[in-house]
Amino acid sequence: MFLAEARVELMRLNLLRANGVCPATQLKQEKELDKKRKELSTQAKDELTTKDVVDLYLTNVIEDRIVIDSRRLAML
């Protein structure tokens, strides 16, 4: 951050304080909101849909099944 940017940020924080807003409290509230949003998004990703369950079943049970053909055993 350049000196000019730091001065602008200081002026912004001073204006917030003059209006009765605590910048530290505001920052904490924003962090808590971000944390809650992340938790909600991870919960949404963790939920399985019916399609996901069917796809898992098909890949784990049906596609991985080894089928032994009895006609082929008779030829051996």
Image (cartoon, grey):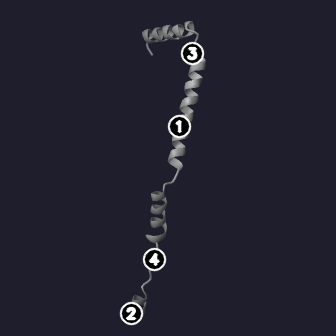
Q: Secondary structure at mark 4?
A: loop
Figure check: 71 above or below 66: below
Looking at the image, tell me whether mark 4 or mark 3 is earlier in sequence order: 3
Looking at the image, tell me whether mark 1 or mark 2 is earlier in sequence order: 1
Residue type pointed to by label 2? Met
Q: Secondary structure at mark 3?
A: helix
Look at the numbered discs 1 and 2 and tell me whether their residues touch, using CB distance below 8 Å.
no
Q: Nearer the viewer, mark 2 or mark 4?
A: 4
Figure check: 74 above or below 16: below
Q: Nearer the viewer, mark 3 or mark 2?
A: 3
Q: Which residue is mark 1?
A: 38
Looking at the image, tell me whether mark 4 or mark 1 is earlier in sequence order: 1
Q: How many marks?
A: 4
Q: Quadrant of the N terminus?
A: top left
Looking at the image, tell me whether mark 1 or mark 3 is earlier in sequence order: 3
- Residue at image location 45% in from the left, 65% down from the top: 59
Residue type pointed to by label 3? Pro
Q: CA distance from mark 1 to mark 2?
A: 60 Å
Look at the numbered discs 4 and 1 and tell me whether their residues touch, using CB distance below 8 Å.
no
Q: Nearer the viewer, mark 4 or mark 3?
A: 3
Residue type pointed to by label 1? Lys
Q: Which residue is mark 3?
A: 23
Looking at the image, tell me whether mark 3 or mark 2 is earlier in sequence order: 3
Residue type pointed to by label 4? Ile
Q: Which residue is mark 4?
A: 66
Q: CA distance from mark 2 to mark 4?
A: 19 Å
Q: Which residue is mark 2?
A: 75
* Percent position of residue 60, x then y: 48, 66
